[in-house]
Image (cartoon, grey):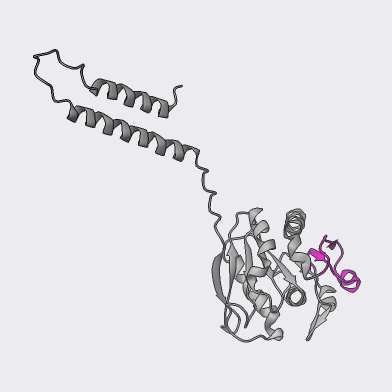
Amino acid sequence: MTDPVDRLLAFAMAEAVRQAPSPPPWPGEPARRRSAPLLAAAAFALLVALGGLVYLVARTAPSPEPATAGPAVASWPAGDGTLLRGDLYPGDEPAGIVLAGAYGAPADELEPIAEPLAARGHSVLVPDLRGEGRSDGVVDVGLAPGDLGAAVAYLASTGVDEVWLAGYLHSGAAAAELAAADPGLVDGLILLYPLERYLGLDTTAALAVVDVPVLLVGASPAVFRAAPPGREHVELGARDSVDFVHAGDELAEAIATFVTRSP
């Protein structure tokens, strides 16, 4: 098939020839006015050539990358009415995941884990802890398990069939306490480098009475022994509990596999 630009240029040349001046008149023949047709032909040819150039540039220019939708900012009340906020990544998988970070870590620091989980189809809610980031109130470790429960309830209200609770460091201890205090609230736990004990929160004691699937990442031997039968443990390529977010895709794959496989 002839290239559209070639067709345009050929048409412009033909039109220019058609509009070109006639041969000079014979002696005694009156002169003809040719300047207007000649200028019109030249202008027409120039416009067509410019149009062809614009078409060629537009055709060869790289297409822009499709925009990736970011998370929505969600808000929900805690048990005492304090307004908590976080990032909500929508998904269409049956299992949704609350991904709670440590104190001093805003929600966007867990983006390297949340984004690949969302890319695998899971709804992911990453809350800012009470008194941090966009959440109201003041930091209160004693209220942390209940605040995670409010986040779980909010994610459940979005239509997911299951809610899994993932907690990092201090939030890992709070997640274990919540699962022990309110059996059946969550479908499973994912504890990321959980602290054994923290200001009244006791991960090992809580796990001793938990009866849901548990995925442990970078847990201590004491936490692993306390977890219920069937628990799994993952060691990442990350060097420590701070560097682990850089293994986000690897961790997301481990979490998605565990959540999908567990009954």
**In this rendering, does residue 13 appear at all?**
yes
Camera-side residue of 93 and 170: 170
Residue 220 falls within the magenta-colored stretch: yes
Q: Give the range drawn in magenta.
A: 211-240
In the rendered structure, the answer to whether residue 93 lies left or right of residue 67 reads right
Spot occupied by residue 32 in the image (x, y as percentages of width and height): 13, 22
Residue 242 falls in which quadrant of the image? bottom right
Q: Measuring 85% from the left and 76% from the top, which residue is drawn there?
A: 204
Q: Quadrant of the C terminus?
A: bottom right
Spot occupied by residue 224 in the image (x, y as percentages of width and height): 88, 69
Residue 116 falls in which quadrant of the image? bottom right
Q: Residue lying furthest top in this view?
A: 26
Residue 127 falls within the magenta-colored stretch: no
In the rendered structure, the answer to whether residue 41 lies left or right of residue 260 reads left
User: Is 71 located above or below residue 41 in the figure?
Assistant: below
Residue 188 falls in which quadrant of the image? bottom right
In the rendered structure, the answer to whether residue 32 lies left or right of residue 195 reads left
Spot occupied by residue 171 in the image (x, y as percentages of width and height): 73, 75
Camera-side residue of 41 and 71: 41
**In this rendering, does residue 263 appear at all?**
no
User: Is 133 located above or below residue 11 in the figure?
Assistant: below
Spot occupied by residue 88 in the image (x, y as percentages of width and height): 59, 65
Camera-side residue of 70 and 46: 46
Q: Measuring 60% from the left and 54% from the top, which residue is drawn there?
A: 92
Camera-side residue of 249 and 140: 249
